[in-house]
Amino acid sequence: MKDNWAAALLAALLAAALAYLRELLVPVLLLFAAMLTDYVTGMIRAWYTRTLCSRVGLRGIVRKLTCLFAVAVGVVVDWVLQAAWAKTGLGLEKSYFVGLTVTVWLILNECISVLENLADMGTPVPRFLRKLIERLRRSSGQDEA
């Protein structure tokens, strides 16, 4: 019974945030799904390549949390812009352009990471996607294994 208040508080906070941020609901849910898929495929790849390491897994979780903070920063920027427009008298409809842009960018990054994980396990990946992965690895300074 003592733990129920924490779960109820978390549920209420999430419900309030999702009600307020209606336009971002689907993109943020897609981001969560992409992050989960990336994490799972990364763990499977690490097991498959015999490089499973709890420290690397923890760093992946921390990285994903910082991505969520980036979305929150984008939403705050949107709020600031909306407040500035309201002060000028030029009412601007509630939009989440910066938050949405950050979210979509992160979804694309997670999808590319999933492709990298699959390619590292030997899954057939179309040639144009393999070239994209190789180009991204070179530009980010990652060594090819």
Image (cartoon, rainbow, N blue to C red):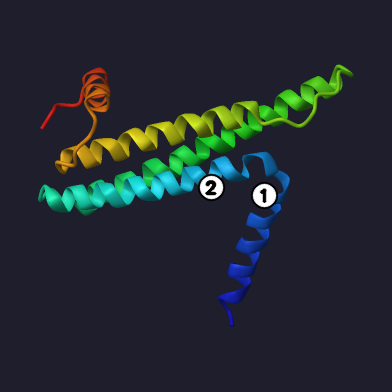
Query: What amino acid is labelled 1 in the image?
Result: Ala
* Residue at image coords 67%, 57%: 15
Q: Nearer the viewer, residue 88 or 15?
A: 15
- Disc 2 crowd rating (10 Å Cα; few below 14, some 14-19, many 20+) is few
Q: What x and y, as percent, mark residue 52?
A: 16, 52
Q: Which mark is residue 17?
A: 1
> If you read the primary sequence from the N terminus, does the residue marked by circle 1 or circle 2 appear first?
1
Q: What x and y, as percent, mark residue 68?
A: 50, 41
Residue 35 lies in quadrant = top left
Look at the numbered disc 2 and give the secondary structure of its residue.
helix
Q: Quadrant of the C terminus?
A: top left
Q: Quadrant of the N terminus?
A: bottom right
- Disc 1 crowd rating (10 Å Cα; few below 14, some 14-19, many 20+) is few
* Residue at image coords 85%, 23%: 91
Q: What x and y, as percent, mark residue 139?
A: 26, 18
Q: What x and y, as percent, mark residue 47?
A: 16, 53
Position of residue 121 relative to residue 87, above or below, is below
* Residue at image coords 70%, 53%: 16
Separation of marks 1 and 2 at Cα, in angstroms: 13 Å
Look at the numbered disc 1 and give the secondary structure of its residue.
helix
Q: What residue is pinned by disc 2?
A: 29
Residue 27 lies in quadrant = top right
Q: Is residue 18 left or right of residue 61?
A: right
